[in-house]
Image (tube, helix red, strand yellow):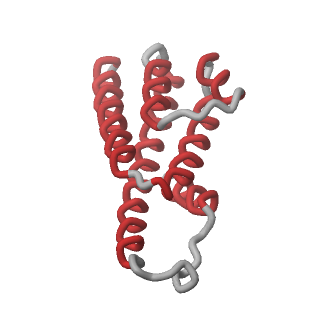
Amino acid sequence: EMEGSMSVALTLYRQCLRSCRNLERSLHPEQTPVVGYCTRALAEQQAAASSSNVLRTLVEAGIPLSATRLVRLAFREGATLSGDEEAAALDSGFRALRCLGSLHSWLGENNDLRKSLEGISDREAPPQPAPSFIAATILRSAK
């Protein structure tokens, strides 16, 4: 069973890193606050459930983490866990992967919207929700 969970964790780690890199590559500057809110919320959740002093210190100091760095820190810590802690870490990893999937969907929809609004003045464009509202919606959908 130990070997199976290690295989799942490695596959999950690779997929999360791939998703983070794709996310960071396709990010438009206007979308950065939404991704920042989501990454911060995931980092806070991970730090609260974690025994890692590194992640907790970074979060408490308010140091922003890229999605890629958060994934690396979380999985490095998860590699030292076993039993129930390992299962909880895997659950957290899958939750992060769902959040990344939701972020990718939102980015695609938002990019389509931005293209459709090209040439329209700011006064004519529909109002956009606050980044914190969008991030909260994405995080709720990823639970």
Task: Please report the residue visible at 46 percent of the width from the left and 49 percent of the height from the top.
Answer: 99
Horizontal side of residue 63 vs 39, given as left or right: right
Residue drawn at x 42%, y 55% as measured from the top left:
28
Q: As drawn, which residue projects farthest toward the top?
A: 80
Whether 20 is drawn above or below 53: the answer is below
- In front here: 31 or 104? 31
Q: Position of residue 142 (x, y in %)?
A: 49, 53
The quadrant where residue 123 appears: bottom right
Q: Quadrant of the N terminus?
A: top left
Query: Residue 121 appears at what percent x and percent y?
Result: 50, 81
In front of the other: 67 or 82: 67
Residue, x 49% and y 35% (percent of image)? 66
- Quarter of the image where one finds residue 137: bottom right
Residue under the point 42% across and 33% down: 68
Position of residue 52 measured from the top left corner of the image (x, y, whole percent): 60, 18
Which of 48/19 is in front?
19
